[in-house]
DNA sequence: GGGAACCTACCTAGTGATAGATAGACAACA
DNA sequence: TGTTGTCTATCTATCACTAGGTAGGTTCCC
């Protein structure tokens, strides 16, 4: 499925923006329609149900996110640099976009999501953990540490998702940096 | 304000349960009314607006949570034991209650909350960080580490809130324990 | 009697979703 | 060339339902 352009793309953009601020239950077809300048019935033309729209938004988000991270085994890029890139991706959501990570927010309200949307969020987390574990398993800086790579990967993911929640609620961007500064504990527990 | 008992208390219970599963926008006065066996108009008798109800739920939640944690300076309880108690509180939400931390979920959707509710969530985080920082500042196990106590306190809070989100989305309770196992990195970064 | 707790009945606004119509683009074909 | 048919994207209008909230009445107990 190619990434939709034109109005369908605009709808996805608007839905992503609103979902990342207000959650899945926090926006309506009418909101989106008004935002992109059409009627709500026309939104249904592109995305028959809200569940399908939600799943499409999450899927596109995941693909973009993983593509941005790149190959975790790229020999041109050191593991430390990849981890920095990972943290920077979350920081950008907070500081530049002033939005949550889409899947961090949807994950919090996972019990109220249609199954298709929940599945996409799950996939996002799985892909993130796999990517982080691949980076952390690369032989480079420090010893691998006591915890296995997957546990440390999960911890980094949880730490950054939580950092967005706490920093946004406290309305202090600096809180994110304070928290992100502890990520190195996971990268090189013996360092 | 004394903790309401009777129907008002039941309403708070029901609202807390639903909010911790589906978020602030995921439950209605009708849901609560049906749950406690009255009419939605009667819910308005006890809590005039949804914002006031939400704030009351969050406030009661915070008070209970902090009371459960106890005095961070209690000489009878070692810092390590206090930290274990803190982690156990989050674990109980996941495993026993099968719910999110109320403020973790509300914090994620903070932009769509009425100001009074958002303020309560903010207070919860501030109190948590203060409690954790007090524990981490106690001279006992290991050196205080490089990061100041407040940064480590923020990190522990973010890590556990994020752990709930990730574990619940992946539907694997063990994920929480894997993540929680890394908390010791913050307790004694030199250990 | 009077107030607390709850009710019935209702309102306005908004929800996701559907039916049916329409204007314009594009191709196929006599 | 002109016509016919089909497709895309949008519209208007409406559906059944739910949202939070309100007015006014009833029941029950001190």
Image (cartoon, coloured by chain):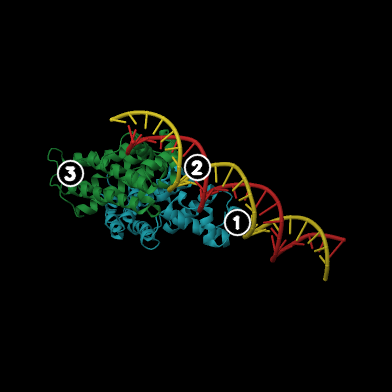
Chain colours: A cyan, B green, C red, D yellow
When asked about the image quadrant of residue B13, the answer is top left
Give coordinates of residue B170: x percent, y percent.
41, 42
- Between D3 and C28, the one lying in front of the other is D3
Residue at figure coordinates x 24%, y 42% from the top left: B66
Q: Which residue is mark 3?
A: B72
Marks 3 and 2 sit apart, C-alpha to C-alpha, by: 42 Å
- Residue drawn at 47 percent across, 56 percent down: A16
Q: How many marks?
A: 3
Callout 3: SS: loop
Query: Sequence order check: which comes first, mark 2 or mark 1?
Result: 1
Q: Are marks 1 and 3 in contact (CB under 8 Å)?
A: no
> Compared with residue B17, is residue A83 higher up or lower down, i.e. above or below?
below
Work out whether residue A31 can be spotted. Answer: yes
Same chain check for tags 3 and 2: no
For label 1, the residue is A42
Q: Residues under labels 2 and 1: Cα distance? A: 24 Å
Image position of B60 with respect to A183: above or below:
above
Query: Label 2's element?
Result: helix
Badge 3 sits on which subunit? Answer: B
Query: Mark 1 falls within which chain?
Result: A
Q: Is residue A97 above or below residue A52?
A: below
Marker disc for residue A115: 2
> What chain does badge 2 belong to?
A
Q: Position of residue B88 (x, y in %)?
A: 27, 38
Q: Nearer the viewer, mark 2 or mark 1?
A: 1
- Residue at 31%, 55% in the rendered image: A167
Q: For numbered disc 1, what is the local secondary structure?
A: helix
Q: How far from the left and from the top, in percent, is residue B77?
A: 15, 38
């Amino acid at each position: 499925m190619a990434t939709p352009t034109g109005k369908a793309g605009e709808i996805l953009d608007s839905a992503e923006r609103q979902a990342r601020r207000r959650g899945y239950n926090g926006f309506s077809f009418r909101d989106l329609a008004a935002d992109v300048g059409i009627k709500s019935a026309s939104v249904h033309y592109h995305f028959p149900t809200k569940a399908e729209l939600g799943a499409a938004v999450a899927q596109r988000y995941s693909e973009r996110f993983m593509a941005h991270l790149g190959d975790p085994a790229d020999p041109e890029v050191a593991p430390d640099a990849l981890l920095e890139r990972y943290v920077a991706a979350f920081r950008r959501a907070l500081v530049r976009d002033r939005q949550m990570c889409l899947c961090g927010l949807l994950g919090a309200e996972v019990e109220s999501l249609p199954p298709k949307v929940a599945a996409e969020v799950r996939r996002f987390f799985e892909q993130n953990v796999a990517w982080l574990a691949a980076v952390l398993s690369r032989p480079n800086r420090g010893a691998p540490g006591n915890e296995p790579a997957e546990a440390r990967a999960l911890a980094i993911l949880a730490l950054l998702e939580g950092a967005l929640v706490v920093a946004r609620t406290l309305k202090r961007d600096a809180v994110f940096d304070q928290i992100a500064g502890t990520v190195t504990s996971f990268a090189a527990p013996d360092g």
